[in-house]
Amino acid sequence: MEFVSQYGLFLAQSVTVVIAILIVVGGVIALGQRQRTERDGHIEVRHLNERYRRMGEALHEAVADKHAVKAEHKAEKKAEKARDKAAKKAAKQGKEGDNKDDKPRLYCLHFHGDLKASATEHLREEISTVLSQVRDNDAVLLRLESPGGMVHGYGLAASQLERIRAAGVELTVAVDKVAASGGYMMACVASRIIAAPFAVIGSIGVLAQLPNFHRLLKKHDVDFELLTAGEFKRTLTLFGENTDKGREKFQEELEITHQLFKDFIRQQRPSLDVDKVATGEVWYGRNALEEGLIDALQTSDDFVQEHLKDWDVYEVRYVQRKHWQEKLGVAAEGAVERSLLRWLQRSSGPHY
């Protein structure tokens, strides 16, 4: 009987543990499904013409004579009624009225680059949305800020911008602060590049850095083993003893990546002397214009203001809801990333 009671107790404990595990696993799965559902983003659109009109009116009402403002409002309402009446009359007669849809549209997108070019996920959604609505004579402005990062990440981001050019849409890239390395790789896809006078442009090069702790481990009698299949599966390592042959191969890979980078820029900007500027140097806006890296000195704000009179200007953003856990993680990741960038984007792989 004692054996039976002990067995029953063991069985009850086992069942309890299994149930607890199932509850935890079920909760994790449910949380994951809920997060996947809530992670579905949406497109937000702002009509910048209307936004700046309201802002201008607010300022005008604050500084102008109140009686004059009141008279202006009356005149505006009267003019609006006249326009509506004329539009209805034209519609009855089968004529085309003054339709704002006749105006060309400028779609404004934003890209704030990090080490992994994470904003590419949003950029691809924004571009897909714009291309589904774009018409002849419409254009796209990309406000680009990026110091560069991982090769494959920025390669994909540049490919997303090529979709705009492939659709026959004029693409302008505006750089207010920095478009360096992978950031410039994206910018050079544009039909036209504009930049602020002190924006940082260029850094057409490739780098890779990693520390090596082999001597430290050896000093403390710590063995490290790395097993690979393939002569160059791993050329340089963090903990193993690096060889001259491995270094030569790694440098060769960097040179190949750099050549691909230069060939891409040469293809996008044939008039640019790529060999002259592909030294890893950076230029400020004015000097970048002299070198042919950009096409004009102008801020993104100036460009938008120029188009407000005769164009309908829309700001398009893909927005994704984040949980507080994700926000905390993003903040921590951003802090770490900024530290890494201060150390020239330390990584074991090549970077633009």
Image (spheres, rainbow, N blue to C red):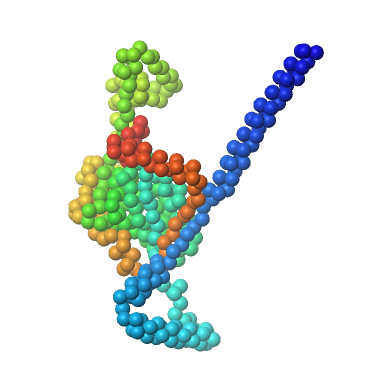
| Residue 263 visible somewhere in the drawing | no
Residue 46 rendering spot, x and y as whole percentages: 44, 64
Quarter holding the N terminus is top right
Residue 10 rendering spot, x and y as whole percentages: 71, 19
The front one of 3 and 23 is 3
Residue 92 rendering spot, x and y as whole percentages: 54, 86
Q: Residue 36 occupies which quadrant of the picture? A: top right
At horizontal 38% and vertical 83% (from top left) the residue drawn is: 70
The front one of 263 and 74 is 74
Number of numbered markers: 0
Residue 231 rendering spot, x and y as whole percentages: 39, 22
Q: From the viewer's perspective, is residue 171 above or below residue 214? A: below
The front one of 203 and 326 is 326
The front one of 346 and 92 is 346
At horizontal 51% and vertical 52% (from top left) the residue drawn is: 41
| Residue 287 visible somewhere in the drawing | yes
At horizontal 38% and vertical 25% (from top left) the residue drawn is: 234
Quarter holding the C terminus is top left
Q: From the viewer's perspective, is residue 337 above or below residue 222? A: below
At horizontal 32% and vertical 67% (from top left) the residue drawn is: 305
Q: Specify whether 344 is left or right of 34.
A: left
